[in-house]
Amino acid sequence: MFRSLYNWTMGLAAHPHALLALALIAFIESSVFPIPPDILIIPMVLAARDQAWKVALIATVASVLGGMLGYGIGALLFDTIGQPIIDFYGKGNYLESFRAQYNDWGAWIVFIAGVTPFPYKVITIASGALDLNLIVFTISSIAARGARFFLVAGLLWYFGQPIRIFIEKYLNILATIFCILLIGGFVALKYLL
């Protein structure tokens, strides 16, 4: 199963509209979509290493813009759209207990959520709902998403073919680890916070 998905994403990475697909996924992932853009960044950079920085830049810009949409959902549409999304991720009662600390630590919270498997969309919506300063939110988002996507692209660019061989050799193990981290992020969100 993972092998066919890997082959499909490698084929998509070479498609003429791959950058548009990446931008769309990065944008919606920051506000509602549960699958991170890394699933396209990795094969896109492996398929065309000379495009690594462009791929990282597009993912960063689209993700930050999507984060601003999430912020807007939290600020303007929290009751109708934001709360159901927060409830979906198991954090319905999370906001009230967190409100007091959020404005003091909001920049760090946004940064940590932006670079880890923690669902970034929850933080984008919470930032709007809790009135985190928009400039602080934006700068923190740019730093976090940029660090994450440029680090991934940079490592893939630097190691190139050897990392591709490694990924293809250990694809099932790596896919399992990725799934565990992704699910772990949701579990941590639901039970630890």
Image (tube, helix red, strand yellow):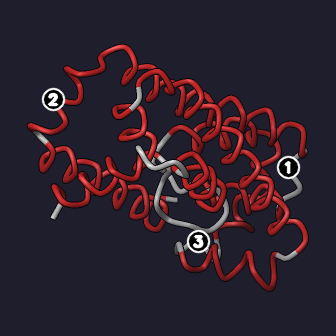
Report which quarter residue 55 is drawn in: top right
The residue singled out by tag 1 in the image is 132
- Which one is closest to the eye, mark 2 or mark 3? 2
Q: Secondary structure at mark 1?
A: loop
Figure disc tally: 3
Q: CA distance from mark 2 to mark 3?
A: 40 Å
Q: CA distance from mark 1 to mark 2?
A: 44 Å
Q: Amino acid at mark 1?
A: Leu
Q: Position of residue 161 (x, y in %)?
A: 23, 22
Q: Secondary structure at mark 2?
A: helix
Extreme-top residue of the structure: 158
Identify the residue shown where x is 58% and y is 71%. 91
Residue 179 shown left or right of residue 111 in the figure: left
Q: Position of residue 158 (x, y in %)?
A: 37, 14
Q: Identify the mark nearer the N-term, 2 or 3.
A: 3
Which mark identifies residue 10?
none
The residue singled out by tag 2 in the image is 165
Q: CA distance from mark 3 to mark 1?
A: 18 Å
Q: Residues within 10 Å of mark 1 (few under 14, many from 20)?
A: many
Identify the residue shown where x is 32% and y is 47%. 10
The residue singled out by tag 3 in the image is 91
Q: Amino acid at mark 2?
A: Ile
In this rendering, is residue 69 above or below 88? Answer: above
Q: Position of residue 182 (x, y in %)?
A: 37, 56
Residue 92 vs residue 160, the one in the foreground: 160
